Image (cartoon, helix red, strand yellow):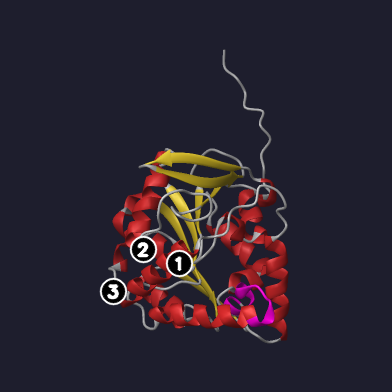
Amino acid sequence: MSTVDTEPVITSYAKAPTKTITAGGTTYSYRELGPKGGIPVIFFVHLAATLDNWDPRIIDPIAQNRHVITFDQPGVGTSTGTFPGELDHAADQAHTFITALGYSLIDIFSFSMGGMIAQDLVVKHPDLVRKLVLTGTGPRGGRDMEKVVGTTYYDLLRATLTRSDPKEFLFFNRNTTGKRAGKAFIARLKERIVDRDTDIRLTAFRSQLKAIQRFGRSAPSDLSVITQPTLIANGDNDRMVPSVLSRDLHERIAGSELIIYPDSGHGGIFQFHERFAPVAVRFLAP
């Protein structure tokens, strides 16, 4: 006798339960929401981020019709293990996690460092990915990519001195519009009030910075192998991963679509979530 799954579909990221799966000696923490079945959308997060750093105004609209999965890399949040010194090794870890869940075909939504890891994953496993979203990121060996480290430490200091969240400086312009968008973004990240993730440990944060620096200084990847439909987006004044690198990605990935939002920085997609989320939903449609 067959049974019917009556488990309600969760479409709010604030209510998505945290789960774990162990593979390759590492226990990965992850959350999933949206209707299950079909190809999942795996979210690759940014430097220093945990499960709690995804904007619900981006995830929730996608989860209305798609199975969404977010996860902590090894050594981050409540995932065990160690974050590696190279981002291509982080791509290997992501592949381990994805295959442990039983998926052989996925869509990817990535932001910043997550986009760097996603590129390495697609280059290594081109048949794994159907559609690719790269936001606030740049290519391996991209010009000035290594400046991420200096910018990060500088803005961490500024945030400390003003008792602000560093993302207000790192992601948004310091004008009236940017400051307002930054505070609204930070407020949205606090909408989840139960089962919060653990902040990233300092050792993992430093490993990520070094890995990004190596990514920026290494030889470019052959991104011509990326033939999947690809959506690239950023603000026009990204200080962390210079906006010109989004254009560089667009030129390297044939047939890709590029969106640059005005008067915005690294977190342009969050500042313009009302415009970007519908675009992402349409792009990621089955």
The amino acid type found where label 3 is placed reads Ser
Is 162 part of what is drawn in magenta? yes
Of labels 2 and 1, earlier in sequence is 2
| Residue type highlighted by circle 1 | Met
- Magenta span: predominant SS is helix
Residues at discs 2 and 1 in contact (Cβ within 8 Å): yes
* Residue highlighted by disc 3: 218
Looking at this view, is 219 or 234 the one in front?
A: 219
SS under mark 1: helix
Q: Residue furthest bottom?
A: 175
Residue 99, image quadrant = top left
Residue 222 horizontal side relative to residue 22, left or right: left
Highlighted magenta segment, given as a residue range? 161-171
Query: Along the line of sight, which residue is nearer the eye, 237 or 164?
Result: 164
Q: What label sits on residue 87 in the rendered view?
A: 2
Q: Residue at x 34, y 64 (%)?
A: 85
Above or below: residue 29 compared with residue 230 = above
Cα distance between the residues tagged 1 and 3: 15 Å
The Cα–Cα distance between marks 3 and 2, rounded to whole angstroms, is 11 Å
Residue type, label 2: Leu
Say the numbered circle drawn on residue 113: 1
Q: Residue at x 57, y 59 (%)?
A: 199
Cα distance between the residues tagged 2 and 1: 9 Å
Can residue 179 be seen in the rendering of this structure? yes
215 with respect to 279 (left or right): left
Q: Which residue is found at the position 70% from the left and 80% from the top?
A: 179
